[in-house]
Amino acid sequence: MSSDGQATVFIDGEAGTTGLGIRERLGHLPVTLCSIDPARRKDADARREMMASVDVVVLCLPDAAAREAVAMADAMGDDAPRILDASTAFRTDPAWVYGFPEMDAAQPERIRRAARVSNPGCYPTGLVGLLRPLVKAGLVPDDYPITVNAVSGYSGGGRSMIEAHERDGGPAFELYGLGLGHKHIPEMKLYAGLAQLPLFVPSVGHFAQGMIVSVPLHLDLLPGTVSLADLHGVLAAHYAGSDRITVAEPCAKLVADALAGTDRMELRVHGNEELGQAVLTARLDNLGKGASGAAIQNLALMLGLEPPPPV
Ligand SMILES: NC(=O)C1=CN([C@@H]2O[C@H](COP(=O)(O)OP(=O)(O)OC[C@H]3O[C@@H](n4cnc5c(N)ncnc54)[C@H](OP(=O)(O)O)[C@@H]3O)[C@@H](O)[C@H]2O)C=CC1
Ligand SMILES: CC(=O)N[C@@H](CCC(=O)OP(=O)(O)O)C(=O)O
């Protein structure tokens, strides 16, 4: 606690893309941000000392550095701060709580009580947001062969990709992860409730922020007779109370960066019933609900505060 009774927060990786986004949003919460001298921001002793002095540490680091930071906290035993980790390192670790408050009615309470919370990946936020309620409701079987196509703005690749795009002007559009082993796949499977790994084809475009995650479905492969309205209805009911996730009407075109700069996510069910085909889409800002916006929601819950209204 700071001298004025506010919770203290240290963002390890404060100068990076996600760290900066969290710092900007922290103004909406009654907390005290503690920072280390920028010249010592990678100094293990300085980071350990700061970690030991605060209530919550938010890790906005590459996976390896996040693991190192967690090892430092482990060594502090009962004096360790609570941790919110933005990296991929602990997202499928059963000892951590997954920071997707909208995924179940009980999830906000689990986050409130947790010592360690993992912030979801940007692509899994879209995929889990779309599929989990449909799998739970039995409309999409857990063994359906799920394919996920997605496009992200280049800020998704952090500082080095931002610099490459802003310096060299491209590429305009590129598929990647074509070895089909992207690090988000186990997280998608686990939290969407799937029995097998989804086939995931990510891509990145020459725009800074924004993301579309899309999932094609063949309606005749779903159990019984499932209509587009059934899929929409389950999603609309699940997210009815959310101020961040909305279930919108289908549209013919979807622009990837329309929610850039916001913490919101829009889900849609598009399709053609005559053809028996549907496409689920999630649109979000990879840096908003896909990273810093979700982190602020989780941080507020961890500190027993009301999450601020979404940017
Ligand atoms: N960008 C996005 O859309 C999303 C990112 N994430 C995750 O958030 C985490 C941070 O990503 P992002 O902000 O994009 O990455 P950036 O590269 O923009 O930022 C990472 C920051 O961590 C610093 N850093 C690296 N190693 C250390 C260390 N050992 N000690 C202290 N600081 C260190 C970097 O400094 P320097 O640059 O000098 O090396 C940089 O400031 C990653 O795990 C990423 O996967 C999650 C969801 C979405
Ligand atoms: C465009 C781009 O490169 N995006 C990143 C994902 C960013 C993200 O979500 O980070 P986490 O891995 O921490 O979840 C990637 O595919 O690795």
Image (cartoon, helix red, strand yellow):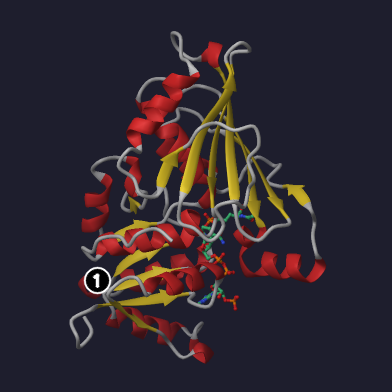
Residue 140 % position (x, y): 45, 22
Residue 243 % position (x, y): 35, 49
Q: Tell me which residue sits at (42%, 51%) in the image.
A: 91
Residue 311 % position (x, y): 43, 61
Q: Tell me which residue sits at (48%, 76%) in the image.
A: 14
Q: Is residue 39 visible?
A: yes
Secondary element at tag 1:
helix
Rendered position, 115 above or below 16:
above
Amino acid type shown at disc 1: Gly
Judging by the rendered image, the residue that carries numbered circle 1 is 77
Task: Judge by depth and name the residue closer to the eye, 195 or 240.
Answer: 240
Q: Tell me which residue sits at (35%, 27%) in the image.
A: 136
Task: Judge by depth and name the residue closer to the eye, 225 or 178.
Answer: 225
Residue 212 figure quarter = top right
Image region (quadrant) for ligand 1: bottom right
Residue 251 % position (x, y): 59, 33
Rendered position, 168 above or below 188:
below
Q: Is residue 88 visible?
A: no
